Image (tube, coloured by chain):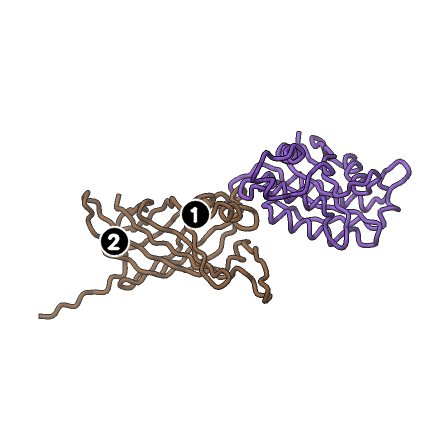
Amino acid sequence: MTTIEAIRETLPAGTWQVDSTHSHVGFAVEYTGGTFRGSFSPVEGALEVDESGQATLSGRAKAESVKVQDENLTAHLLAPDFFDAERAPEITFSSTAIEREGDVIDAVGELTIKGITQPVELEGTASEPITDAAGNERIGLQLRSTVDRREFGLDWNMALPNGEPALAYDVELVAELYLVKK
Amino acid sequence: MITLLGISGSLRRQSYNSQLLLQLRELLPEGVELEVWDGLKDVPPFDEDDEAAGPVPAAVSRMRDAIAGADAVLFSTPEYNHSVPGQLKNALDWASRPTATNVLRNKPVAVVGASKGAFGAVWAQADLRKVLAAAGARVVDGEVAVGHAHERFDESGALVDESLREQLGEVVDALVAETRPRVAVAA
Protein backbone atom coordinates (compact mmCIF):
# COMPACT_ATOMS: atom_id res chain seq x y z
CA MET A 1 0.00 0.00 0.00
CA THR A 2 1.25 3.40 -0.84
CA THR A 3 0.48 6.56 1.08
CA ILE A 4 0.88 9.98 -0.33
CA GLU A 5 1.46 12.66 2.28
CA ALA A 6 0.01 16.04 1.56
CA ILE A 7 2.62 18.78 1.25
CA ARG A 8 2.31 20.99 4.30
CA GLU A 9 1.38 24.55 3.47
CA THR A 10 1.14 25.99 6.95
CA LEU A 11 3.23 26.12 10.07
CA PRO A 12 1.83 24.39 13.17
CA ALA A 13 -0.64 26.52 15.10
CA GLY A 14 0.41 28.10 18.37
CA THR A 15 2.66 30.69 19.91
CA TRP A 16 6.24 29.68 19.43
CA GLN A 17 8.85 31.62 21.34
CA VAL A 18 12.44 31.98 20.24
CA ASP A 19 14.77 29.97 22.47
CA SER A 20 17.58 32.53 22.69
CA THR A 21 20.13 30.06 23.96
CA HIS A 22 19.85 27.70 21.03
CA SER A 23 19.17 30.22 18.27
CA HIS A 24 21.70 32.04 16.14
CA VAL A 25 21.21 35.28 14.24
CA GLY A 26 24.20 36.52 12.34
CA PHE A 27 25.72 37.96 9.22
CA ALA A 28 28.44 37.12 6.74
CA VAL A 29 30.13 39.65 4.48
CA GLU A 30 33.08 39.31 2.12
CA TYR A 31 36.11 41.14 3.48
CA THR A 32 39.27 41.36 1.40
CA GLY A 33 39.30 37.84 0.06
CA GLY A 34 37.69 36.16 3.04
CA THR A 35 34.38 36.08 4.86
CA PHE A 36 33.79 38.10 7.99
CA ARG A 37 31.08 36.79 10.30
CA GLY A 38 29.32 38.15 13.33
CA SER A 39 26.21 37.51 15.35
CA PHE A 40 23.71 39.12 17.66
CA SER A 41 22.66 37.59 20.94
CA PRO A 42 20.41 37.28 22.73
CA VAL A 43 17.65 37.44 20.15
CA GLU A 44 14.06 37.71 21.28
CA GLY A 45 11.12 36.81 19.11
CA ALA A 46 8.05 34.77 18.49
CA LEU A 47 6.18 32.99 15.74
CA GLU A 48 2.41 33.25 16.01
CA VAL A 49 0.38 30.81 13.94
CA ASP A 50 -3.40 30.86 14.14
CA GLU A 51 -5.70 27.90 13.45
CA SER A 52 -6.03 28.85 9.79
CA GLY A 53 -2.26 28.72 9.43
CA GLN A 54 -1.80 32.47 9.19
CA ALA A 55 1.68 33.10 10.57
CA THR A 56 3.64 36.11 11.73
CA LEU A 57 7.24 36.12 12.83
CA SER A 58 8.84 38.93 14.77
CA GLY A 59 12.20 39.31 16.37
CA ARG A 60 14.56 41.84 17.88
CA ALA A 61 18.09 42.16 19.10
CA LYS A 62 20.13 44.95 20.61
CA ALA A 63 22.60 46.46 18.17
CA GLU A 64 25.12 46.63 21.01
CA SER A 65 24.89 42.84 21.35
CA VAL A 66 26.89 42.36 18.14
CA LYS A 67 29.53 39.66 18.62
CA VAL A 68 32.76 39.62 16.65
CA GLN A 69 36.18 38.41 17.69
CA ASP A 70 37.91 41.70 18.44
CA GLU A 71 36.83 44.50 20.78
CA ASN A 72 38.11 47.18 18.41
CA LEU A 73 36.00 45.78 15.60
CA THR A 74 33.04 45.64 17.95
CA ALA A 75 33.57 49.30 18.77
CA HIS A 76 33.74 50.16 15.07
CA LEU A 77 30.54 48.24 14.37
CA LEU A 78 28.74 50.16 17.14
CA ALA A 79 29.98 53.54 15.87
CA PRO A 80 28.14 55.83 13.43
CA ASP A 81 30.10 54.24 10.55
CA PHE A 82 28.01 51.10 11.04
CA PHE A 83 25.11 50.42 13.43
CA ASP A 84 25.27 53.67 15.41
CA ALA A 85 24.02 51.79 18.44
CA GLU A 86 23.61 54.95 20.51
CA ARG A 87 21.06 56.36 18.12
CA ALA A 88 19.54 53.10 16.87
CA PRO A 89 19.75 50.64 19.73
CA GLU A 90 17.48 47.97 18.29
CA ILE A 91 17.44 45.78 15.22
CA THR A 92 13.98 44.42 14.49
CA PHE A 93 12.21 42.18 12.01
CA SER A 94 8.49 41.82 11.53
CA SER A 95 6.98 39.59 8.88
CA THR A 96 4.14 40.69 6.63
CA ALA A 97 3.58 37.34 4.90
CA ILE A 98 4.86 33.81 5.39
CA GLU A 99 4.35 31.04 2.90
CA ARG A 100 5.22 27.41 3.27
CA GLU A 101 5.51 24.61 0.75
CA GLY A 102 6.72 21.42 2.35
CA ASP A 103 9.96 22.22 4.14
CA VAL A 104 10.46 25.44 2.25
CA ILE A 105 9.57 28.73 3.92
CA ASP A 106 9.35 32.11 2.28
CA ALA A 107 8.94 35.05 4.65
CA VAL A 108 8.47 38.62 3.53
CA GLY A 109 8.77 41.36 6.09
CA GLU A 110 10.33 44.58 7.27
CA LEU A 111 13.81 44.75 8.68
CA THR A 112 14.90 47.79 10.67
CA ILE A 113 18.59 48.48 11.10
CA LYS A 114 20.08 51.84 12.14
CA GLY A 115 16.56 53.22 12.33
CA ILE A 116 15.95 52.52 8.63
CA THR A 117 13.18 50.11 7.69
CA GLN A 118 13.44 48.17 4.43
CA PRO A 119 11.44 45.29 2.96
CA VAL A 120 13.28 41.97 2.92
CA GLU A 121 12.52 38.48 1.74
CA LEU A 122 13.85 35.56 3.77
CA GLU A 123 14.02 32.06 2.40
CA GLY A 124 14.68 28.87 4.24
CA THR A 125 13.29 25.76 5.81
CA ALA A 126 11.09 24.68 8.69
CA SER A 127 11.39 21.48 10.67
CA GLU A 128 8.49 19.42 12.04
CA PRO A 129 7.58 19.78 15.72
CA ILE A 130 9.54 17.58 18.08
CA THR A 131 9.02 17.05 21.81
CA ASP A 132 12.10 17.80 23.89
CA ALA A 133 13.26 16.05 27.06
CA ALA A 134 11.21 18.40 29.24
CA GLY A 135 8.05 17.74 27.26
CA ASN A 136 8.05 21.04 25.32
CA GLU A 137 7.20 21.11 21.65
CA ARG A 138 9.89 22.66 19.50
CA ILE A 139 10.33 23.59 15.84
CA GLY A 140 13.22 24.99 13.91
CA LEU A 141 13.26 27.75 11.29
CA GLN A 142 16.31 28.45 9.18
CA LEU A 143 16.06 31.68 7.19
CA ARG A 144 18.49 33.56 4.95
CA SER A 145 18.51 36.73 2.96
CA THR A 146 21.03 38.97 1.29
CA VAL A 147 20.77 42.73 1.70
CA ASP A 148 22.80 45.69 0.48
CA ARG A 149 24.03 47.25 3.73
CA ARG A 150 24.01 50.71 2.13
CA GLU A 151 20.21 50.58 2.09
CA PHE A 152 20.41 50.70 5.88
CA GLY A 153 22.99 53.47 5.99
CA LEU A 154 25.93 51.16 6.74
CA ASP A 155 28.11 52.48 3.96
CA TRP A 156 31.61 52.50 5.45
CA ASN A 157 34.39 51.28 3.23
CA MET A 158 38.10 51.55 2.57
CA ALA A 159 39.86 51.21 -0.77
CA LEU A 160 42.32 48.37 -1.29
CA PRO A 161 45.57 49.00 -3.20
CA ASN A 162 43.80 47.73 -6.33
CA GLY A 163 41.07 50.31 -5.86
CA GLU A 164 38.42 47.77 -4.93
CA PRO A 165 36.43 48.25 -1.70
CA ALA A 166 37.75 46.24 1.27
CA LEU A 167 34.30 45.30 2.53
CA ALA A 168 31.49 44.03 0.31
CA TYR A 169 28.12 45.77 0.32
CA ASP A 170 26.09 42.58 -0.01
CA VAL A 171 25.62 41.00 3.41
CA GLU A 172 24.14 37.59 3.98
CA LEU A 173 21.80 37.47 6.97
CA VAL A 174 21.20 34.17 8.70
CA ALA A 175 18.57 33.33 11.31
CA GLU A 176 18.67 29.83 12.72
CA LEU A 177 15.74 29.93 15.10
CA TYR A 178 14.78 27.28 17.55
CA LEU A 179 11.28 27.90 18.86
CA VAL A 180 9.44 26.54 21.88
CA LYS A 181 5.65 26.29 22.02
CA LYS A 182 4.08 28.25 24.86
CA MET B 1 24.40 73.88 29.88
CA ILE B 2 25.96 72.27 26.80
CA THR B 3 29.73 72.59 26.76
CA LEU B 4 31.63 72.66 23.50
CA LEU B 5 35.39 72.26 23.42
CA GLY B 6 37.14 74.25 20.72
CA ILE B 7 40.41 72.85 19.40
CA SER B 8 42.51 74.94 17.05
CA GLY B 9 44.94 73.09 14.82
CA SER B 10 47.34 76.00 14.85
CA LEU B 11 49.88 76.83 17.55
CA ARG B 12 50.58 80.34 16.29
CA ARG B 13 49.76 83.09 18.78
CA GLN B 14 47.87 85.14 16.18
CA SER B 15 46.28 82.07 14.61
CA TYR B 16 43.23 82.74 12.47
CA ASN B 17 41.78 79.41 13.48
CA SER B 18 42.11 80.15 17.19
CA GLN B 19 40.58 83.54 16.48
CA LEU B 20 37.73 81.85 14.62
CA LEU B 21 36.92 79.71 17.65
CA LEU B 22 36.95 82.74 19.93
CA GLN B 23 34.62 84.53 17.54
CA LEU B 24 32.30 81.54 17.52
CA ARG B 25 31.46 82.36 21.12
CA GLU B 26 29.40 85.25 19.75
CA LEU B 27 27.30 82.82 17.73
CA LEU B 28 26.41 80.34 20.42
CA PRO B 29 22.75 79.67 21.15
CA GLU B 30 21.55 80.19 24.70
CA GLY B 31 22.57 77.39 27.01
CA VAL B 32 25.74 76.60 25.08
CA GLU B 33 29.27 77.53 26.08
CA LEU B 34 32.54 77.11 24.23
CA GLU B 35 35.85 76.54 25.95
CA VAL B 36 38.90 76.91 23.74
CA TRP B 37 41.57 74.35 24.58
CA ASP B 38 45.12 75.66 24.69
CA GLY B 39 47.14 72.54 25.48
CA LEU B 40 47.98 71.37 21.97
CA LYS B 41 51.63 72.41 22.05
CA ASP B 42 52.26 70.38 25.22
CA VAL B 43 51.24 67.03 23.70
CA PRO B 44 54.36 64.85 23.20
CA PRO B 45 54.91 62.73 20.09
CA PHE B 46 52.80 59.62 20.03
CA ASP B 47 54.95 56.55 20.57
CA GLU B 48 53.40 53.17 21.18
CA ASP B 49 56.40 52.22 23.34
CA ASP B 50 55.73 55.20 25.63
CA GLU B 51 52.06 54.27 25.68
CA ALA B 52 52.85 50.68 26.67
CA ALA B 53 55.38 51.75 29.31
CA GLY B 54 52.92 54.21 30.82
CA PRO B 55 51.86 56.31 32.55
CA VAL B 56 49.98 58.43 30.03
CA PRO B 57 51.79 61.80 29.69
CA ALA B 58 50.09 64.50 31.76
CA ALA B 59 49.42 66.69 28.73
CA VAL B 60 47.66 63.78 27.03
CA SER B 61 45.59 63.08 30.13
CA ARG B 62 44.55 66.73 30.27
CA MET B 63 43.54 66.61 26.60
CA ARG B 64 41.57 63.39 27.06
CA ASP B 65 39.84 64.82 30.13
CA ALA B 66 38.95 67.99 28.24
CA ILE B 67 37.44 66.00 25.36
CA ALA B 68 35.66 63.55 27.65
CA GLY B 69 34.21 66.39 29.70
CA ALA B 70 32.79 68.26 26.72
CA ASP B 71 29.45 67.45 25.12
CA ALA B 72 30.95 68.06 21.68
CA VAL B 73 34.19 69.21 20.08
CA LEU B 74 34.58 71.85 17.41
CA PHE B 75 37.83 71.79 15.46
CA SER B 76 39.19 74.68 13.46
CA THR B 77 42.16 73.74 11.37
CA PRO B 78 44.64 75.39 9.05
CA GLU B 79 46.08 73.42 6.18
CA TYR B 80 49.73 72.41 5.95
CA ASN B 81 50.81 70.82 2.69
CA HIS B 82 47.21 70.04 1.76
CA SER B 83 46.46 68.22 5.01
CA VAL B 84 46.03 68.32 8.79
CA PRO B 85 48.83 70.04 10.77
CA GLY B 86 51.14 67.42 12.24
CA GLN B 87 50.71 68.43 15.87
CA LEU B 88 46.92 68.21 15.64
CA LYS B 89 47.11 64.82 13.96
CA ASN B 90 49.58 63.67 16.62
CA ALA B 91 47.24 64.81 19.40
CA LEU B 92 44.37 62.91 17.78
CA ASP B 93 46.54 59.83 17.52
CA TRP B 94 46.90 59.99 21.32
CA ALA B 95 43.24 60.83 21.79
CA SER B 96 42.14 57.86 19.70
CA ARG B 97 43.71 55.34 22.08
CA PRO B 98 42.74 52.81 23.29
CA THR B 99 40.80 52.19 20.11
CA ALA B 100 37.66 50.61 21.55
CA THR B 101 37.11 53.04 24.42
CA ASN B 102 38.80 56.25 23.30
CA VAL B 103 37.33 59.62 24.31
CA LEU B 104 36.41 60.52 20.74
CA ARG B 105 34.26 57.45 20.27
CA ASN B 106 30.65 58.59 19.74
CA LYS B 107 31.66 62.16 20.56
CA PRO B 108 29.84 64.70 18.39
CA VAL B 109 32.46 66.70 16.47
CA ALA B 110 32.46 69.31 13.73
CA VAL B 111 35.24 70.75 11.62
CA VAL B 112 35.77 74.22 10.21
CA GLY B 113 38.93 75.82 8.96
CA ALA B 114 40.68 78.99 7.93
CA SER B 115 43.64 79.68 5.70
CA LYS B 116 45.21 82.66 4.01
CA GLY B 117 44.77 80.96 0.66
CA ALA B 118 41.57 80.97 -1.37
CA PHE B 119 40.31 77.55 -0.35
CA GLY B 120 40.00 77.83 3.43
CA ALA B 121 41.76 74.59 4.36
CA VAL B 122 39.16 72.37 2.65
CA TRP B 123 41.56 69.45 2.14
CA ALA B 124 42.76 69.60 5.73
CA GLN B 125 39.13 69.68 6.86
CA ALA B 126 38.31 66.62 4.74
CA ASP B 127 41.32 64.74 6.10
CA LEU B 128 40.46 65.75 9.65
CA ARG B 129 36.90 64.46 9.26
CA LYS B 130 38.31 61.17 8.00
CA VAL B 131 40.64 60.88 11.01
CA LEU B 132 37.83 61.72 13.45
CA ALA B 133 35.48 59.18 11.85
CA ALA B 134 38.21 56.55 12.08
CA ALA B 135 38.42 57.26 15.82
CA GLY B 136 34.67 56.62 16.03
CA ALA B 137 33.46 60.20 16.49
CA ARG B 138 30.02 61.37 15.36
CA VAL B 139 31.20 63.74 12.63
CA VAL B 140 28.45 66.21 11.76
CA ASP B 141 27.98 67.40 8.21
CA GLY B 142 28.88 70.96 7.40
CA GLU B 143 32.01 72.66 6.24
CA VAL B 144 33.02 76.25 6.63
CA ALA B 145 36.03 77.25 4.60
CA VAL B 146 37.34 80.64 5.64
CA GLY B 147 39.60 81.56 2.76
CA HIS B 148 41.76 84.71 2.66
CA ALA B 149 41.58 84.56 6.45
CA HIS B 150 43.84 87.61 6.84
CA GLU B 151 41.04 89.73 5.33
CA ARG B 152 38.18 88.27 7.37
CA PHE B 153 38.80 89.80 10.78
CA ASP B 154 38.75 93.47 11.74
CA GLU B 155 41.25 95.15 14.05
CA SER B 156 39.34 94.06 17.14
CA GLY B 157 39.51 90.46 15.94
CA ALA B 158 35.83 90.25 15.00
CA LEU B 159 34.77 88.23 12.00
CA VAL B 160 33.51 90.73 9.48
CA ASP B 161 31.96 88.45 6.84
CA GLU B 162 28.24 88.07 7.56
CA SER B 163 27.76 85.02 5.32
CA LEU B 164 30.61 83.25 7.08
CA ARG B 165 29.03 84.07 10.43
CA GLU B 166 25.82 82.46 9.19
CA GLN B 167 27.62 79.35 7.97
CA LEU B 168 29.48 79.03 11.26
CA GLY B 169 26.22 79.44 13.15
CA GLU B 170 24.71 76.58 11.14
CA VAL B 171 27.64 74.29 11.94
CA VAL B 172 27.35 75.15 15.64
CA ASP B 173 23.61 74.44 15.51
CA ALA B 174 24.20 71.07 13.83
CA LEU B 175 26.85 70.19 16.40
CA VAL B 176 24.61 71.17 19.30
CA ALA B 177 21.75 69.15 17.76
CA GLU B 178 24.02 66.10 17.65
CA THR B 179 24.50 66.32 21.43
CA ARG B 180 20.79 65.59 22.00
CA PRO B 181 20.13 62.55 24.12
CA ARG B 182 20.59 59.33 22.23
CA VAL B 183 17.13 57.90 21.76
CA ALA B 184 15.70 54.68 20.42
CA VAL B 185 14.72 55.14 16.80
CA ALA B 186 14.09 51.54 15.78
CA ALA B 187 10.50 50.48 15.11
Numbered disc 2: secondary structure: loop
Q: Nearer the viewer, mark 2 or mark 1?
A: 1
Q: Which residue is mark 2?
A: A12
Residue B75 in percent (x, y) is at 71, 42
Residue denoted by label 1: A67
Instruction: Residue at the far right: name it.
Output: B155
Q: Quadrant of residue B172?
A: top right
Q: Amino acid at mark 1?
A: Lys
Q: Colour of chain B?
A: purple
Give the distance between the C-alpha atoms of the residues marked 2 and 1, in whole angstroms: 32 Å
Mark 1, residues whose alpha carbon is within 10 Å: few (<14), some, or many (≥20)? some
The amino acid beneath tag 2 is Pro
- Write the residue at 39% across / 56% down: A174
**Residue nearest the viewer, comparing B152 with A96:** B152
Q: Residue at x 72, y 35 (%)?
A: B39
- The image position of residue B100, as x and y in percent, is 53, 43
Q: How many marks?
A: 2
Residues tagged by mark 2 and mark 1 found on one chain of the structure? yes
Q: Quadrant of the N terminus of chain B?
A: top right
Residue A85, x across and y down, in percent? 51, 44
Looking at the image, residue A162 lies above or below residue A174: below
User: Could you tell me which chain the residue with mark 2 belongs to?
Assistant: A
Label 2 vs 1, first from the N-terminus: 2
Residue A104, by quadrant, is bottom left
Residue at the outermost left position: A1
Query: What shade does chain A have?
Result: brown
Percent x, y for residue A32? 51, 62
